[in-house]
Image (cartoon, grey):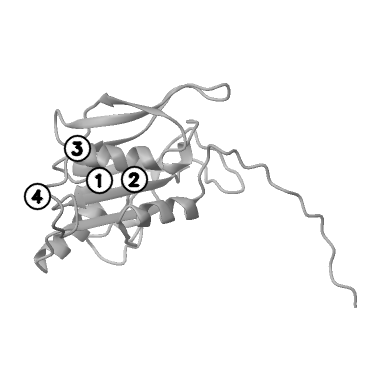
């Protein structure tokens, strides 16, 4: 019998958009270790870390405390950090690249979408402890705002501005929004945020370089 024949069409991928595989390798090159967490979390995490008072509630959760779908990856990363600190870890670099889930009446049914629900992929990283691994070249110092800013800039495929912002999970007065400038195909938009002392950077990968 003859094998099936189908046309092969090359996909046009913009050079300013980075694949998930590329982002994972970039984070690993920066010294971060990938973690994988459940997509459902405690309701309190959504309120405290995402400012989301109306999360998507599961009808049949696998555990009573994992009752809602997460719209932010930060709560899971902080739980990962707590686990490592309980085992006397002094330095941690963690990241997660996964889908998040939020109610959005503007989303329509489609091949990869469900009406009323935004299922956006996000990349979140967490840095804790010393800025560098143990070494003799310079005195040890704690990771700071500018270390995180440098990591974020190395991930972005286009230039970005950083503006002061407020976020329920980030440190007041030490948090910045990552703003992607307008281009011919998209308007200016905020694609993420990061901070010091709350150990996190949070970037939406589905909105690089354009936003919706």
Quickly name the residue at label 1. 46
Marked residue nearer the N-terminal end (4 or 3) = 4
Name the residue at 36% across, 55% down.
29
Mark sitting earlier along the chain (3/1): 1
Q: Where is residue 30 in the image (x, y as percent from the top left)?
A: 33, 52
State yes or no: discs 1 and 2 in contact (Cβ < 8 Å).
yes
- Mark found first going from the N terminus, 1 or 4: 1
Pointer 2 with pointer 3, Cβ within 8 A: no
Label 2 Cα neighbours within 10 Å, binned few <14 / some 14-19 / many ≥20 = many
Crowding around mark 3 (Cα neighbors within 10 Å: few <14, some 14 to 19, many 20+) is some
Residues packed near mark 1 inside 10 Å, few (<14), some (14 to 19) or many (20 plus): many
Badge 4 element:
loop
Question: Label 1, label 4: how many angstroms apart (C-alpha)?
Answer: 38 Å
> Distance from label 2 to label 3 (Cα)?
24 Å
Residue at label 3?
145
Q: Nearer the viewer, residue 11 or 75?
A: 11
- Residue at mark 2: 71
Residue 14 visible, this angle: yes
Q: In which quarter of the image is residue 195?
A: top left
Q: Distance between the residues labelled 4 and 3?
A: 18 Å
Q: Earlier in the sequence, mark 1 or mark 2?
A: 1
């Amino acid at each position: 019998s003859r094998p099936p024949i189908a046309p092969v069409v090359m996909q046009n991928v913009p050079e300013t958009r980075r694949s998930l595989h590329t982002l994972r390798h970039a984070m690993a090159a920066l010294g971060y270790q990938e973690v994988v967490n459940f997509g459902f979390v405690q309701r309190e995490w959504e309120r405290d870390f995402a400012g989301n008072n109306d999360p998507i509630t599961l009808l049949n959760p696998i555990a009573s405390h994992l009752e809602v779908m997460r719209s932010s990856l930060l709560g899971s990363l902080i739980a990962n950090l707590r686990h490592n600190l309980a085992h006397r870890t002094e330095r941690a670099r963690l990241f997660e690249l996964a889908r998040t889930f939020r109610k959005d009446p503007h989303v329509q049914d489609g091949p990869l979408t469900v009406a009323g629900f935004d299922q956006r992929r996000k990349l979140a990283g967490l840095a804790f402890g010393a800025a560098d691994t143990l070494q003799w070249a310079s005195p040890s110092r704690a990771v700071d705002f500018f270390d995180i800013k440098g990591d974020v800039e190395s991930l972005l495929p286009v230039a970005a501005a950083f503006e002061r912002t407020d976020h329920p999970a980030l440190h007041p007065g030490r948090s910045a929004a990552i703003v992607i400038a307008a281009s011919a195909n998209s308007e200016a938009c905020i694609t993420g945020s990061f901070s010091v002392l709350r150990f996190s950077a949070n970037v939406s990968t589905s909105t690089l370089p354009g936003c919706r």
